Amino acid sequence: MFVSSRGEEKARTLADHARKLGMEASAVGDVEEALGEASLVVTATTSTEPVLPEEIPADAFVAAVGSFRPDMAELPAALIRSANRVVVDELEGAREEAGEPIQAERAGP
């Protein structure tokens, strides 16, 4: 497991905690360092700015679970628009609250 955060200390703390729980975890300074090796990417932030780049490996599965307001977006609009599939837990809720699909639709093709 790779752990990335905008603050290196936070990434190290989370990686240390994961190791205490018996997981293999390494803190990385830049998320792009880990993307070439990761097939599962989980974002869990309340960020209003994307934390992933516009392009990631084609075989990566991304679970973005942090944004719950239209102004929040862990993923860039271009990444959402280029996805093979976007799955949401509740369609009506996503239309009103999930920042990524709302911002992707506003940004257009």
Image (spheres, rainbow, N blue to C red):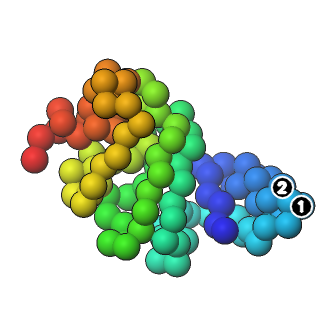
- For this orientation, the residue located farthest to the right is 20
- Quadrant in which the N terminus appears: bottom right
Tell me whether circle 2 and circle 1 mark residues in contact (CB < 8 Å). yes
**Residue at the spot x=57%, y=43% of the render?**
44
Within-10-Å neighbours for mark 1: few <14, some 14–19, many 20+? few
The kind of residue on which mark 1 rests is: Lys
Specify the amino acid type for callout 2: His
The image's mark for residue 94 is none
> Could you classify mark 2 by the number of other residues whose Cα lies within 10 Å: few (under 14), some (14-19), or many (20 or more)?
few
Q: Is residue 41 above or below residue 38?
A: above
In x, y percent, where is residue 17?
Answer: 84, 55
Residue wearing tag 1:
20
Name the residue located 27 percent from the left edge and 55 percent from the top edge.
85
Q: Which residue is mark 2?
A: 17
- Coordinates of residue 8 in the picture (x, y in percent): 69, 55
Residue 43's spot in the image, x, y percent? 53, 49
Cα–Cα span, label 2 and label 1: 5 Å
Image position, residue 33 (x, y; %): 53, 72
Confirm whether residue 30 shows in the render.
yes
User: Residue at (27%, 32%) from the top-left corner?
Assistant: 102
- In-front residue for pair 29/35: 35
